[in-house]
Image (tube, coloured by chain):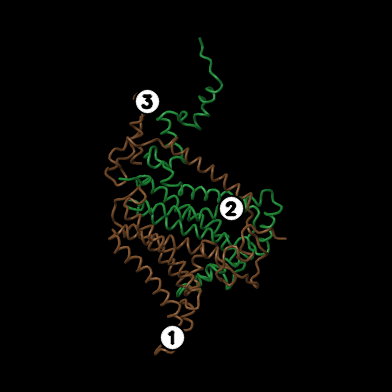
C-alpha cells in the first residue's frame, strides 16, 4: 500500500525547502547544533555554552541590547533619511514635516531618538558589567580595548545626530560640544575647523555631521562590532568562573 | 569554537548519517575553560536564542510605547544670533560641561575625559591577575571597596559642587586671590594657576584620599584598587551628568529639577 504523503511533508521534502533549510526542525541535538553552525546570523553563537551564561542577572543582556538598539537605529535611521535633506534651508522643515504630516513620522523620530539615548546607557552599563565581573582579564584584554573604542564611537554617533534637527536645541548643544573640542591644547582651532568646516556652525558643519552620522561612524562601529563579536567567540565565549 | 566542535560531535546520535568534519585542533587549558566542560553546558538553540528573542521583543515594545507616549523635543529654527539660556550639551556630555564650570575648558573637556578613557582602556594591562573572572565581586573586600568608592565619590562630588557654588568656594576664592602680585607671575600665569593647577591639585588630592584610604583600610590587591578607581570614574560619570541635567538652570546656576527653566523640561508642546 502506497504511503500517503501529507501536504506538509511534501513541502518539507521538496528541493526548494531543503535548499532553504538545510536541516530538520531543531528539536534534536543534532539539528539544534546544525541550525547554529549553518545559519550566518546564528553562527555568531557557539553551539553550546555554559548554563552560567544564560543567567540574565549575570549579563543583564546589556551587550545584546546595545546591538539591538544599534539595529533599531539603523532601520529607523534609514527610513528617516527618506525625508531628510541635510541643508540648513530644508533640514528643520523636514523634521517638522516628520512631526506633523508624514505618516508615523513622529513615531519614527521618537524611536530613533530614544533608542540613541538607550544605546548610550546600555553601552556604558555593559562596560560596567564587564568590569565588575572581571571579564576583561586574559584572554579578553584586547576585546576590552575594542569595547572602549565602541563606547567612544557610540558617543560620537549620538553627538553627530544631535545636530541634524537643526533647531535651537541641536545648534547650541553642538556649539557647547565643539567649543570644548576647540579648547584642545595646541590643536584646538584645527580640531574645531575639522569638525564644523568653518568658523561657526553652518552648512559646513551640518553636512559633515550628517555624513559622519549616516556613513562614517556606522561603518566604524560595524567594523569594531564585527571584531568585538568575533573576539568573544575566539576568547572562549562569554566569561565564566574558572 | 573550541567549545563547539568536540561537544557537537559527541552530541551526535551513534546512527547519524552525517559525520562532522574536523575543522580545527586547539590546545586546551585556557582560562575560559572549566574542568568538566560537558556537565554544565546547554545548547544555544533553544536556550540562549529564546532569551535573546524575548529581550528584543520586550525592549521593542517598551521603545514603541515610550515613542508613542513621549514627544521628542523640537524647538524653533536654529539661530546663531540668539543664544538660549542655558545652552546645554547632550545629557551624556553634561558631566563634562559640569566640570567646565570649575576649571579650564581644555582640562575639563579634553584632558580629563581623554585621560580617563585611556586609563580605562589600559585596565587589562594594569590588572594582570587572571583569577576572579565570571562573577560579580569574587572577593568581599572588592565589594566593600566598590561601595565605599561609590559613596565617597558621590559625597565628595556633590559636596564640591555645593562648595564651589559659595563665596568661599575655590572658583570665587581664586578669583579674589591676587596671584598677579606674586613675583614672576603675570596675568597668563595667574590664569593657569586658577584654572589648571589648583583644580588639578584638588582632583588629585581627592583621588589620593580615595587611594590611601582604600590601601589603609583594606590592603587591596591591584584588582581591588582598580575597582576603587573605576567605580570613582563610573559614578562620577553618572553623578555629574545628573547634576548637569537636573540641577543646572539659567546661567548654569544650581536649581532644583522642578525649578528648571521651561526650555529644559521634557516633553515640550509641539512648536507652532
Q: Which mark is residue A152?
A: none
Q: Which one is nearer the viewer's eye here, A154 or B251? A: B251
Residue identified by numbered label 2: A112
Q: Residue at x 65, y 52 (%)?
A: A106
Extreme-top residue of the structure: A1
Residue identified by numbered label 3: B16
Q: Quadrant of residue B260?
A: bottom right
Point out residue A155 in the picture as x, y percentages from the top left corner.
50, 59
Residue identified by numbered label 1: B179
Q: Chain A's shade in the image?
A: green
Q: CA distance from mark 3 to mark 1?
A: 85 Å
Evaluate whether label 2 is on the same chain as label 1: no
Within 10 Å of disc 3 (Cα), the crowding (few <14, some 14-19, many 20+) is: few
**Looking at the image, do the residues carrying marks 3 and 1 touch, with CB atoms under 8 Å apart?**
no
Q: Label 2, secondary structure: give it.
A: helix
Among the two numbered marks 3 and 1 on one chain, the one whose residue lies closer to the N terminus: 3
Q: In this image, B171 relative to B70: left or right? A: left
Point out residue B101 in the picture as x, y percentages from the top left corner.
50, 72
The mark lying in front, picked from 2 and 1, is: 1
The chain under label 1 reads B
Q: Chain B's shade in the image?
A: brown
Q: Residue at x 42, y 54 (%)?
A: A127
Point out residue B217 in the picture as x, y percentages from the top left corner.
30, 62
The chain under label 2 reads A
Within 10 Å of disc 1 (Cα), the crowding (few <14, some 14-19, many 20+) is: some
The mark lying in front, picked from 3 and 2, is: 2
Amino acid at each position: 500500500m502506497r504511503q500517503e504523503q501529507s501536504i506538509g511533508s511534501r513541502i518539507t521534502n521538496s528541493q526548494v525547502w531543503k535548499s532553504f533549510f538545510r536541516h530538520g526542525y531543531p528539536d534534536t541535538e543534532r539539528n539544534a547544533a546544525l541550525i547554529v553552525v549553518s545559519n550566518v546570523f546564528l553562527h555568531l553563537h557557539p553551539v553550546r555554552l555554559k548554563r552560567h551564561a544564560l543567567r540574565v542577572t549575570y549579563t543583564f543582556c546589556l551587550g545584546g541590547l546595545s546591538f539591538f538598539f544599534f539595529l533599531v537605529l539603523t532601520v529607523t535611521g534609514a527610513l528617516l533619511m527618506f525625508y531628510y535633506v541635510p541643508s540648513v534651508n530644508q533640514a528643520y522643515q523636514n523634521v517638522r514635516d516628520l512631526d506633523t504630516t508624514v505618516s508615523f513620522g513622529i513615531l519614527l523620530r521618537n524611536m530613533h531618538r530614544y533608542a540613541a539615548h538607550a544605546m548610550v546607557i546600555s553601552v556604558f552599563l555593559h562596560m560596567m558589567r564587564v568590569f565588575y565581573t572581571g571579564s576583561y582579564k586574559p584572554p579578553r584584554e584586547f576585546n576590552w580595548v575594542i569595547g572602549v573604542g565602541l563606547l567612544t564611537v557610540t558617543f560620537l554617533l549620538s553627538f553627530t545626530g544631535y545636530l541634524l534637527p537643526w533647531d535651537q536645541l541641536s545648534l547650541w548643544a553642538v556649539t557647547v560640544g565643539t567649543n570644548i573640542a576647540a579648547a584642545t591644547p595646541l590643536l584646538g582651532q584645527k580640531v574645531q575647523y575639522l569638525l564644523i568646516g568653518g568658523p561657526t556652525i553652518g552648512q559646513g558643519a551640518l553636512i559633515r555631521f550628517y555624513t559622519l552620522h549616516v556613513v562614517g561612524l556606522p561603518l566604524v562601529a560595524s567594523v569594531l562590532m564585527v571584531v568585538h563579536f568575533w573576539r568573544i567567540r575566539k576568547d572562549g565565549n562569554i566569561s565564566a568562573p574558572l | 569554537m573550541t567549545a563547539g566542535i568536540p561537544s557537537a560531535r559527541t552530541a551526535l546520535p551513534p546512527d547519524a548519517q552525517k559525520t562532522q568534519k574536523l575543522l580545527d585542533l586547539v590546545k586546551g587549558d585556557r582560562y575560559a575553560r572549566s574542568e568538566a566542560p560537558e556537565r554544565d553546558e546547554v545548547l544555544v538553540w533553544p536556550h540562549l536564542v529564546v532569551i535573546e528573542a524575548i529581550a528584543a521583543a520586550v525592549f521593542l515594545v517598551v521603545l514603541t510605547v515610550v515613542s508613542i507616549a513621549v514627544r521628542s523635543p523640537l524647538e524653533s529654527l536654529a539661530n546663531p544670533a540668539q543664544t538660549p539660556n542655558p545652552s546645554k550639551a547632550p545629557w551624556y556630555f553634561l558631566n563634562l560641561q559640569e566640570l567646565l564650570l570649575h576649571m579650564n575648558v581644555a582640562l575639563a573637556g579634553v584632558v580629563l575625559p581623554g585621560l580617563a578613557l585611556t586609563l580605562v582602556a589600559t585596565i587589562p594591562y594594569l590588572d594582570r591577575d587572571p583569577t576572579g573572572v565570571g562573577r560579580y565581586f569574587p572577593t568581599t573586600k572588592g565589594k566593600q571597596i566598590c561601595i565605599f568608592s561609590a559613596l565617597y565619590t558621590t559625597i565628595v562630588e556633590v559636596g564640591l559642587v555645593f562648595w564651589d557654588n559659595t563665596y568661599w568656594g575655590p572658583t570665587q576664592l581664586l578669583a579674589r586671590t591676587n596671584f598677579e602680585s606674586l613675583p614672576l607671575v603675570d596675568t597668563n600665569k595667574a590664569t593657569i594657576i586658577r584654572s589648571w593647577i589648583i583644580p588639578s591639585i584638588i582632583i588629585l588630592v581627592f583621588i589620593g584620599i580615595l587611594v590611601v584610604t582604600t590601601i589603609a583600610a583594606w590592603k587591596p590587591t591591584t584588582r581591588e584598587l582598580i575597582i576603587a578607581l573605576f567605580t570613582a570614574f563610573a559614578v562620577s560619570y553618572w553623578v555629574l551628568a545628573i547634576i548637569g541635567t537636573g540641577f543646572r538652570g539659567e546661567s548654569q546656576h544650581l536649581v532644583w529639577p522642578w525649578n528648571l527653566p521651561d526650555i529644559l523640561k521634557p516633553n515640550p508642546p509641539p512648536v507652532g
